[in-house]
């Protein structure tokens, strides 16, 4: 309708008639008298003709967008399905492998681009190391399982890594989270086909005629966790149960490890890939508890036949009837861990001519002990997750006592044990870190070492064992000719560097060139020098490995054992001349080895006498450092060795910054 001004008359028209008046007057302001007349005539309101609209255009259907949305939907559906199946049935093995490849490629690209004196996307090479160390550490912890085992293996060799990696991987020795009890029950039921109560004869309802078992683990590692139990006949046992997901993950994890190692060996030109299959095989055997039981019984037999060790070393008994491929049951060990230095040294508060619980001739529970009866344990089993009796009576009032042992005796026993394994038996335990060694006091006041965790061993054939013994003798007598001949057969191009790595101290038989330090240099010069040191480290690795087809694979784990034993000695204050004791066993083994002809044994005996005289000079150095340490003027012999190694390693491009067990 149209609204006319007050000067005209009002006219109403409906829109249905579709006609507009010819003359209309718009609304005019009060102060204005002007009129506006529309010039056009009335026209009907009709749709435009088809000819006036132009050519017809089809409606937009967006076929490419719909196609890509459809593909995205199918991809998301497939990814979600694979992820669901992977998490539910394959313990996230595929997810962990993809995560490993992705991060591995990312780290490799980072180093390929930024490993230069002036990194384009980092402030320095140290910053590149720092961020990649964090990435790898987070990956190993996130993936867990066998990845933690690999991380611990790297941590043991962290001395050859940049300082940023040393600090990051020192945290790899933290306890791993333990699995829920329902997962533990499933593993036992799957391996034995019976319930936990039937397998071990225990009760969780308080039946005093049966045994008891703690559902909360006493210790948890990367691959397994340990539970305490007491059987119906009174025997206390340690049940090592593999984490349920490990069996499904191990094949994927080792395959990923091989692929990443191959890529890195090719990309960074480091000749180590031929060693990877041997390392993978050792890691896989660690998940086979039947193999661990065999290793444990074999080592127990070796110790029992050696009069110099049988009263000083103990290997826990394995209960085969309660063990399987994923479950290892052995006698429970009460003792002080090697890292508890104070408890080893503090005065003995136990009885006269008594030992600590469980040692030779000493029962686990003393007479008239309280709280250890079957009825009491059965009652606790119903109300508590942890029911094992705490045995601290031998520590005395307020637990201020200890084993009252000499650190020298403890460390001497350890070096003797691993030297005998290395040179006499050719059967070497390769994981002797402090968590795997218990110390107990015998009734005669002498220490007893208990060695556990026998999953990782290497066997040395007789020819290589004899070569390695001769190699050690050559090291300590500066016999460069013999040294060069032996390591040449192993494919090593630089005997001096390899000798230093073996002794864990600079080898003085050859010439070790010194280089200018970083003091007094500009920032640009420091970055260039740092880059040159990193390149020198790669060169040193190539020279040690040399011809990797000849390099004895066992040396990887032998070096691991030597490094951990050295760290143990250093942690305890260097009470033992480790190098001399090891060398003495090497020389003695060439006299006592049963697979050598008599004539050669006789010649070796004469050389052994001369060798003992030569080692007298080593004793002089050792006692000089002990006197200086006593007067507070310096550290022990191992501290001096590490300080010298830092200087030599820096010349080769490696910075040694901290103790292996720090953190």
Image (cartoon, helix red, strand yellow):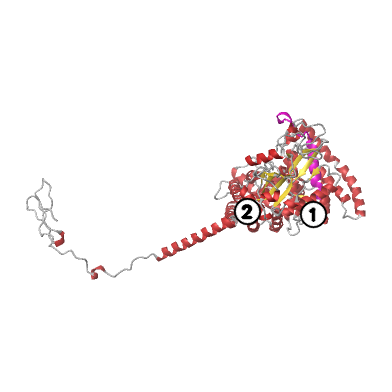
Q: Is residue 658 above or below residue 298?
A: above
Q: Is residue 652 visible?
A: no
In this orientation, which residue lies closer to the viewer: 663 or 579?
A: 663
Answer with left or right where residue 236 lies relative to residue 601.
Answer: left
Residue 623 placed where, x, y %? 81, 36
Q: Is residue 122 above or below residue 392?
A: below
Q: Quadrant of the C terminus?
A: top right
Residue 522 placed where, x, y %? 60, 42
Answer with left or right where residue 297 lies relative to residue 32.
Answer: right
Q: Quadrant of the N terminus?
A: bottom left
Residue 377 placed where, x, y %? 69, 39
Mark-to-mark CA distance, 1 and 2: 33 Å
Q: Which residues are magenta?
A: 396-422
Q: Report the mark closest to the observer, 1 or 2.
A: 2
The residue positioned 63% from the left and 42% from the top of the image is 521
In this orientation, which residue lies closer to the viewer: 634 or 307?
A: 307
Pointer 1 residue: 460
**For residue 15: magenta?**
no
The mark nearer the N terminus, 1 or 2, is 2
In this orientation, which residue lies closer to the viewer: 532 or 623?
A: 623
Q: Is residue 127 above or below residue 58?
A: above
Q: How many residues crowd around disc 1 within 10 Å: few (fewer than 14), some, or many (20 or more)?
A: many
Q: Residue furthest top?
A: 397
Query: Under tag 2, what secondary structure?
Result: loop
Pointer 2 residue: 245
Answer with left or right where residue 526 lies relative to residue 462.
Answer: left
Magenta span dominant secondary structure: helix
Query: Under tag 1, what secondary structure?
Result: loop
């Amino acid at each position: 309708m149209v609204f006319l001004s007050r000067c005209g008359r009002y006219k109403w028209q409906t829109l249905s008639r579709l006609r507009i008046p010819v003359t209309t007057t718009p609304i005019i302001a009060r102060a204005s008298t002007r009129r506006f007349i529309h010039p056009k005539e009335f026209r009907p309101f009709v749709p435009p003709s088809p000819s006036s609209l132009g050519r017809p255009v089809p409606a937009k259907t967006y076929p490419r967008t719909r196609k890509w949305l459809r593909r995205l939907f199918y991809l998301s559906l497939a990814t979600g399905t694979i992820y669901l199946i992977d998490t539910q049935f394959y313990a996230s093995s595929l997810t962990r492998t993809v995560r490993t490849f992705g991060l591995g490629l990312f780290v490799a690209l980072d180093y390929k681009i930024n490993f230069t004196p002036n990194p384009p996307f980092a402030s320095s090479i140290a910053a590149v190391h720092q961020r990649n160390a964090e990435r790898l550490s987070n990956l190993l912890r996130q993936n867990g399982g066998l990845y933690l085992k690999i991380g611990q293996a790297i941590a043991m060799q962290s001395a050859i890594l940049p300082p940023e990696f040393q600090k990051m991987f020192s945290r790899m020795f933290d306890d791993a989270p333990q699995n829920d009890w329902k997962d533990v029950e499933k593993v036992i039921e799957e391996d034995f086909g019976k319930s936990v109560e039937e397998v071990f004869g225990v009760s969780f309802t308080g039946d005093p005629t049966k045994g008891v078992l703690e559902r909360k683990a006493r210790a948890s590692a990367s691959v397994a966790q340990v539970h305490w139990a007491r059987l119906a006949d009174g025997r206390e046992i340690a049940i090592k149960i593999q984490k349920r997901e490990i069996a499904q993950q191990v094949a994927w994890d080792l395959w990923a490890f091989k692929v990443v190692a191959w890529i890195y060996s090719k990309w960074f030109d480091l000749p180590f890939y031929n060693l990877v299959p041997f390392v993978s095989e050792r890691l896989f055997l660690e998940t086979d508890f039947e193999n661990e039981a065999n290793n444990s019984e074999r080592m127990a037999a070796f110790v029992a036949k050696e009069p110099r060790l049988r009263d000083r070393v103990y290997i826990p008994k394995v209960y085969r009837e309660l063990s399987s491929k994923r479950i290892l049951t052995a006698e429970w060990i009460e003792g002080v861990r090697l890292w508890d230095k104070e408890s080893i040294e503090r005065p003995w508060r136990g009885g006269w001519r008594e030992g600590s619980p469980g040692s030779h001739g000493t029962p686990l529970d003393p007479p008239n002990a309280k709280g250890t009866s079957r009825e009491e344990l059965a009652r606790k089993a119903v109300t508590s997750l942890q029911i094992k009796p705490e045995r601290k009576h031998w520590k005395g009032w307020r637990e201020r006592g200890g084993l009252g042992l000499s650190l020298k005796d403890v460390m001497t026993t350890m070096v003797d044990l691993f030297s005998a394994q290395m040179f006499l038996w050719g059967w070497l335990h390769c994981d002797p870190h402090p968590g795997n060694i218990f110390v107990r006091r015998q009734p005669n006041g002498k220490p007893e070492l208990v060695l556990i965790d026998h999953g990782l061993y290497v066997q040395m054939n007789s020819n290589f064992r004899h070569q390695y013994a001769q190699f050690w003798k050559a090291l300590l007598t500066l016999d460069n000719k013999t040294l060069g001949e032996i390591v040449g057969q192993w494919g090593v191009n630089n005997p001096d560097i390899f000798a230093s790595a073996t002794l864990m101290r600079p080898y003085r038989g050859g010439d070790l060139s010194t280089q200018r330090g970083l003091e007094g240099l500009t920032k640009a010069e420091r970055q260039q020098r740092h880059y040159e040191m990193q390149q020198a480290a790669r060169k040193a690795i190539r020279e040690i490995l040399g011809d990797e087809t000849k390099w004895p694979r066992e040396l990887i784990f032998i070096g691991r054992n030597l490094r951990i034993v050295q760290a143990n000695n250093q942690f305890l204050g260097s009470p033992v001349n480790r190098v001399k004791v090891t060398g003495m066993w090497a020389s003695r083994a060439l006299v006592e080895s049963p697979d050598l002809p008599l004539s050669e044994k006789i010649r070796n005996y004469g050389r052994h006498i001369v060798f003992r005289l030569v080692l007298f000079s080593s004793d002089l150095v050792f006692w000089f450092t002990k006197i200086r340490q006593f007067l507070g003027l310096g550290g022990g012999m191992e501290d001096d060795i590490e300080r010298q190694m830092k200087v030599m390693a820096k010349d080769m491009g490696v910075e040694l910054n901290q103790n292996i067990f720090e953190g």
